[in-house]
Image (cartoon, grey):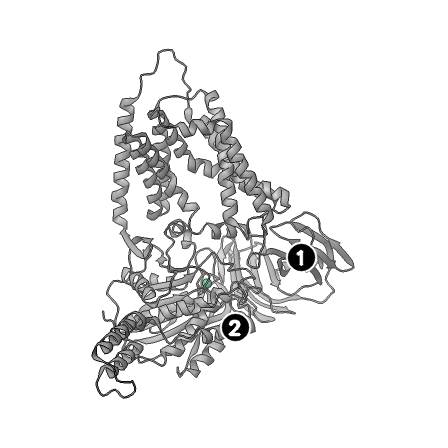
């Protein structure tokens, strides 16, 4: 591995040498000591500032971003806009002297599990900057945005703009490595462009390093996303990124350990980007993502809401990494570790250490159990014993958690808003904690009436059993997740082993910390807002969800309540604060703080420029009856929304969804399906050859053509287009904006005599009937669905 000197460094040093040499004419003569001081100052400037400048121009990247996100606009996979943005990138590549840039076309896009293949017209815009050697470094971003109303300025117009600007500045540098600039399509649909790229790019075996820029906002963090299925980016790459960013003088590189530990449990990895298909091919790769708590995947991901300083930060970093690894990369292709960051210090904890730690935690739990059991007082003969202390305590836990999770509803009710916390999550987090204190106080009043057992052991043993269940459950999902209940076991064990009450309490306080950190992690905002994003959740589901939250977090917190009881019963002194909290002053203090917090939150706005109310206007038509309905939906109440539809002008009341009534298609056929069928029968099966022509008035946003038959009756289905087969059904789907006329050939083999139904469904962003909608602080999404079901007559 070598660290080539940058052009700017060598320029500065040669300037310094010239100044120090006696033949320098450009500067006035100076005394030797003065000369020494000036040279020292200059030398320091060289050392500290040499690397803080790269030729990356923020203004020029901002201009590319403006073109992509404002002039071109939303760019879902396969859309003409995605194509236009890629053509723009190619034009720029050519301008920078990159010969023959091209689009690696993708007409059928395989997806991650469960998403199936989609027909599309997408690909990857590729610019190849030839180096002197054999090695290739790929610099990537994704051109697509996540929907037809989403400008994707941050996600990932910004990354694409950074890649284009890097093409400009790197084309002015002599590189040993060949640098491939890749702007992928279809990232938002399941990394489809990059998956296709790693399978079809002819020199993929020469790729030594992949650097992805997915989101380059300057609002807060720059997050290295380093994980793919079962492996992470190599340590040297992560380490180098931190070193280079620090040398550059930028700040904000931050790895949210707990958030990614939780994400590691989500099938498919939760959050991801185009570097992952490379990592799965054993190519060292890393992605830099800016703060994922920004309003991405919403119409507010716009140029106006974007902080341009992030372009320079990400661009400088990638530029430095290219310089650093231009002449070679270390051997190690990937890593397996748990990354912890304290300030700018990094700790790569190998996963085998986890197993060791889990064993230690279990050992401590067992030793503590034996010790506590020995200390246990003999049960009194004939004395009354509560049979299952666990169940009664669990009831108390349910009370506390109900207070926590229902607290926001108090503000909701007063404000008349369902999700009052979108713009101010921290305030509602505090409100939940204060409400939990009130719940705890009530629990403490009830506790003496429950006649609970008084031996510490009964509680501790149950806490350990609960934590063991969590440990096994987490370990099944991911090794990294298992650390969290292990930490709880470890600290709770220590709390039982030590004798000093203060120390006991300190260890007990530490015991739930890590398990809570998983959910109330760095990504808490992201998770909370993502949960709100789906417009389909009605009041009923909302109640079910609240009950599930209360139940889940009661279970999750229960071992610590048991643990507290065990600690409390193990020492009789040192809990005066609890006795004090138990008096009426406890409820007065927490209740007072709770009310103050509510008053404060009532004065705060619930929506902002970044977090607006999302409203969907949906029109659905059945093509046979020509009847349709128009529905307005939102996760939030629609009250005050002014709607003009046909001759009706309404202001809606408190509801989340309103059906505006039936409409009739004007007779203009939005969707027409014509087909020719040929059938050949054999003893047990019928071969059906179909040629379908689907014509639409507008280019559809999504299109799906499906065939279904009785159970076990579909033997085979085939088409030169991408087709998905699943029990008894076969379908083809398009995304997005294919042509207004599509010719679809396919053949099916079904059981002889079975019935065959065809269903064509199309979604448009155009409206069948004009619906005007006004509501302050909202963004509106419009969709028209058409469907046509046909029973196919095979006896021709
Ligand atoms: Zn993205």
The percent coordinates of residue 16 (x first, y second) are: 26, 80
On the image, which quarter does residue 643 sit in?
bottom right
Helix or strand or loop: what does disc 1 sit on? loop
Say left or right for 579 vs 7. Answer: right
Tell me where residue 658 appears, x and y as whole percent.
68, 51
Residue 299 in the figure: left or right of residue 378: right
Question: Which mark, residue 559?
Answer: none
- In the image, the residue with mark 2 has its CB under 8 Å from the nearest atom of ligand 1: no
Residue carrying label 1: 775
Structural crowding at the residue carrying mark 2, measured as other residues with C-alpha within 10 Å and reported as few (<14), some (14–19) or many (≥20): many
Q: Earlier in the sequence, mark 1 or mark 2?
A: 2
- Measured as percent of width and height from the top left, residue 777 is found at 62, 57
Q: Which residue is mark 2?
A: 66
**Near-viewer residue (606 or 578):** 578
Q: Which residue does the image show at 46% across and 49% down from the upper left?
A: 524
Q: Nearest the camera: 793 or 481?
A: 481
Is 439 rendered above or below residue 100? above
Neighbours of disc 1 within 10 Å: few (<14), some (14-19), many (20+): some
Is residue 390 in sight in this rendering?
Answer: yes
Between 774 and 701, the one nearer to me in the picture: 774
Name the residue located 48 percent from the left edge and 53 percent from the top edge.
526
Between the C-alphas of marks 1 and 2, the distance is: 28 Å
- Tell me if label 1 and label 2 are in contact, CB under 8 Å: no
In the rendered image, the vertical position of residue 135 relative to residue 349, given as above or below: below
Q: Is residue 629 above or below residue 201?
A: above
x and y, in percent, of residue 496 in the image = 30, 30
The quadrant the N terminus occupies is bottom left
Instruction: Locate residue 534 relative to residue 649 in the image: left or right.
Output: left
Q: Which SS class for mark 2?
A: helix
Residue name at image x 58 percent, y 71 percent: 739
Quarter holding the C terminus is: bottom right
Residue furthest to the right: 647
């Amino acid at each position: 591995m070598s660290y080539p000197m940058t052009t700017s460094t060598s320029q500065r040093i040669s300037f310094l040498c010239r100044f120090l040499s006696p033949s320098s004419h450009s500067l006035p003569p100076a005394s030797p000591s003065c000369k020494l001081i000036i040279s020292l100052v200059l030398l320091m400037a060289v050392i500290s500032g040499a690397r803080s400048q790269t030729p990356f121009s923020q203004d020029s990247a901002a201009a590319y971003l403006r073109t992509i996100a404002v002039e071109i606009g939303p760019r879902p996979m396969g859309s003409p806009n995605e194509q236009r943005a890629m053509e723009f990138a190619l034009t720029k590549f050519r301008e920078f002297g990159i010969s023959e840039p091209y689009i690696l076309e993708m007409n059928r896009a395989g997806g991650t599990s469960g998403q199936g293949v989609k027909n599309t017209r997408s690909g990857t815009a590729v610019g190849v900057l030839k180096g002197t050697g054999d090695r290739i470094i790929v610099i990537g971003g994704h051109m697509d945005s996540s929907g037809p109303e989403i400008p994707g300025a941050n996600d990932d117009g910004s990354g694409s703009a950074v890649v284009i600007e890097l093409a400009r500045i790197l084309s002015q540098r002599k590189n040993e490595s060949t640098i491939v600039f890749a702007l992928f399509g279809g990232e938002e649909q399941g990394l489809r462009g990059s998956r296709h790229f790693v399978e079809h790019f002819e020199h993929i075996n020469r790729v030594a390093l992949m650097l992805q820029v997915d989101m380059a906002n300057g609002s807060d963090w720059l997050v290295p996303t380093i994980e793919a299925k079962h492996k992470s980016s190599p340590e040297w790459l992560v380490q180098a990124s931190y070193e280079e960013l620090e040398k550059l003088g930028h700040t904000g590189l931050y790895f949210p350990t707990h958030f990614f530990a939780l994400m590691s449990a989500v099938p498919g990895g939760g959050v991801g980007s185009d570097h992952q298909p490379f990592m799965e091919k054993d190519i060292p790769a890393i992605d830099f993502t800016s703060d994922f708590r920004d309003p991405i995947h919403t119409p507010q991901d716009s140029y106006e809401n974007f902080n341009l300083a992030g372009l320079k930060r990400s661009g400088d970093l990638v530029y430095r990494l290219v310089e650093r690894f231009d002449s070679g990369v270390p051997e190690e292709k990937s890593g397996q570790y748990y990354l912890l960051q304290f300030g700018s210090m990094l700790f790569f904890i190998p996963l085998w250490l986890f197993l060791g730690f889990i064993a230690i935690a279990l050992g401590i739990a067992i030793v503590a159990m034996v010790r506590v059991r020995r200390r246990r007082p003999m049960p009194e003969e004939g004395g009354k014993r509560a049979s299952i202390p666990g169940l009664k305590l669990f009831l108390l836990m349910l009370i506390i958690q109900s207070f926590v999770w229902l607290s926001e509803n108090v503000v909701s009710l007063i404000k008349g808003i369902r999700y009052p916390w979108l713009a101010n999550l921290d305030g509602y987090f505090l409100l939940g904690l204060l409400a939990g204190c009130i719940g705890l106080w009530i629990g403490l009043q009830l506790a003496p009436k429950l006649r609970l057992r008084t031996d510490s052991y009964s509680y501790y043993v149950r806490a350990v059993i609960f934590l063991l269940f969590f440990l096994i459950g987490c370990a099944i999902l991911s090794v990294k997740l298992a650390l969290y209940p292990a930490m709880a076991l470890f600290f709770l064990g220590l709390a039982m082993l030590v004798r000093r009450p203060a120390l006991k309490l300190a260890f007990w306080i530490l015991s739930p910390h890590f398990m809570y950190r998983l959910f109330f992690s760095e990504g808490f905002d992201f998770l909370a807002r993502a949960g709100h994003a789906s417009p389909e959740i009605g009041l009923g589901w909302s109640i079910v969800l609240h009950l599930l939250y209360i139940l889940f977090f009661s279970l999750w917190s229960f071992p610590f309540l048991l643990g507290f009881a065990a600690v409390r019963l193990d020492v009789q002194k040192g809990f005066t604060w609890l006795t004090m909290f138990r008096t009426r002053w406890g409820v007065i203090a927490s209740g007072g703080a709770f009310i103050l917090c509510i008053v404060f939150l009532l004065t705060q706005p619930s929506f902002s420029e970044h977090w607006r109310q999302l409203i969907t206007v949906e029109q659905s038509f059945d093509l046979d009856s020509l009847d349709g309905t128009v529905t307005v939906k939102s996760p939030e109440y629609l009250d005050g929304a002014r709607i003009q539809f046909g001759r009706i002008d309404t202001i809606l009341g408190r509801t989340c969804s309103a059906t505006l009534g039936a409409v009739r298609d004007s007779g203009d056929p939005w969707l027409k399906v014509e087909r020719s069928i040929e059938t050949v029968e054999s003893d047990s099966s019928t071969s059906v050859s179909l040629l379908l022509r689907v014509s639409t008035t507008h280019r559809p946003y999504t299109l799906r053509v499906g065939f279904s038959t009785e159970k076990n009756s579909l033997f085979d289905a085939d088409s030169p287009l991408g087709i998905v087969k699943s029990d008894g059904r076969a379908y083809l789907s398009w995304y997005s904006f294919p042509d207004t006329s599509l010719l679809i050939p396919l053949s099916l083999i079904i059981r002889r005599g079975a019935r065959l139904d065809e269903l064509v469904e199309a979604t448009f962003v155009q409206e069948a009937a004009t619906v005007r909608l006004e509501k302050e602080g909202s963004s509106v999404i419009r969709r028209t669905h058409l469907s046509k079901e046909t029973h196919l007559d095979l006896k021709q």
